[in-house]
Amino acid sequence: MNKIVVKNISKSFKLKNKRFYDIGKETIKKEILKDISFEVNHGEIIGIIGPNGSGKTTLLKIISNLLLPDSGNIDIKGKISPMLDIGIGFHPELTGRENISLFCALNGQNEPDVKRFEQMIEFSGLSEETISQKFKYYSSGMKVRLGFSTIAFLKPEIVLLDEINAVGDISFQEKTRDKIRQLAKNSGIMLVVSHDVNFVKDLCTRAIAITDGYVLADDKPEIVSYKYLNYMREHKDEKI
């Protein structure tokens, strides 16, 4: 069965000295993640919430093996399909159709059969004219539509989504939620980063709040959202 075990993950980044009179001084390190631990089992939809700079996206990149942690380790059972940056894995000079074939190849899949190919296009809601255009002409919403639709019909085991609800219209967001539930039900794992606590409460089976690099709460979405919003109200005048 698919599973993710995150154990004592920490990550820091060096901050550049931007001011002229700071050049030559020792570079400052900022801790983004501090001793993060949790487990995710098959069938779970985990919502990760937190303010900007709290380490949500950094965490997904570490789980995706796009970044290495400073300490700690991650044990993953299952193939990861990340959708962290809009357009990642797609070539700007290729059409939507050509990019579907490319994305499948990059993810170790053979050319999708005609039925699945058309399912991807139909789910995306992109017109025949749009799907035949070069990817570089797509809007952010179009890129998300194509990206999610391609991943969803490759029968993924573990999907990582970063702010999937931030772009696209409401009708596509609703389709996305339904598809995520279906994928998770088929023994998949979904990790979804979002600023929208209502989106997380509506979609996820569990939530994790990260603030200032730490796990603030890990529980049912309603409980985590309550604790997170209280924390944000108490620290609204602070730089988090």
Image (tube, rainbow, N blue to C red):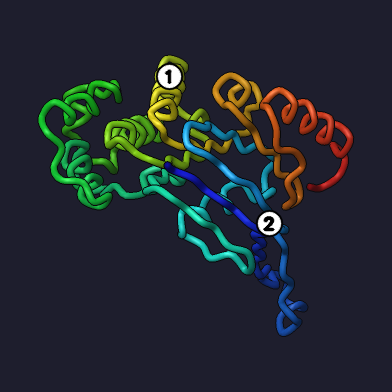
Front-most of 63 and 141? 63
Label 1 is placed on what type of residue? Asp
Q: Horizontally, is 12 left or right of 121 in the view?
A: right
Q: Which residue lies furthest to the top in this view?
A: 171
Label 2 is placed on what type of residue? Leu
Q: Which residue is drawn at 51% across and 40% down?
A: 162
Q: In the rendered image, which quarter contains the N terminus? A: top left
Q: What kind of element bears circle 2?
A: strand
Q: Could you tell me residue 37's position as x and y percent?
A: 66, 52
Q: Name the residue under label 1.
A: 178
Q: Which residue is drawn at 24% across and 28% down?
A: 120
Residue 138 disc label: none
Placement of 139 over or under 61, stated as above or below: above
Q: Horizontally, is 121 left or right of 186 in the view?
A: left
Residue 133 location, quadrant: top left
Q: Could you tell me residue 129's position as x and y percent?
A: 17, 26
Q: Mark 2 points at which residue?
A: 33
Q: How far apart are marks 1 and 2 (CA)?
A: 31 Å
User: Disc 1 vs disc 2: Cβ atoms closer than 8 Å?
Assistant: no
Q: Could you tell me residue 19's position as x and y percent?
A: 73, 71
Q: Which residue is drawn at 70% across and 37% down?
A: 218
Q: Residue at x 25, y 46 (%)?
A: 103
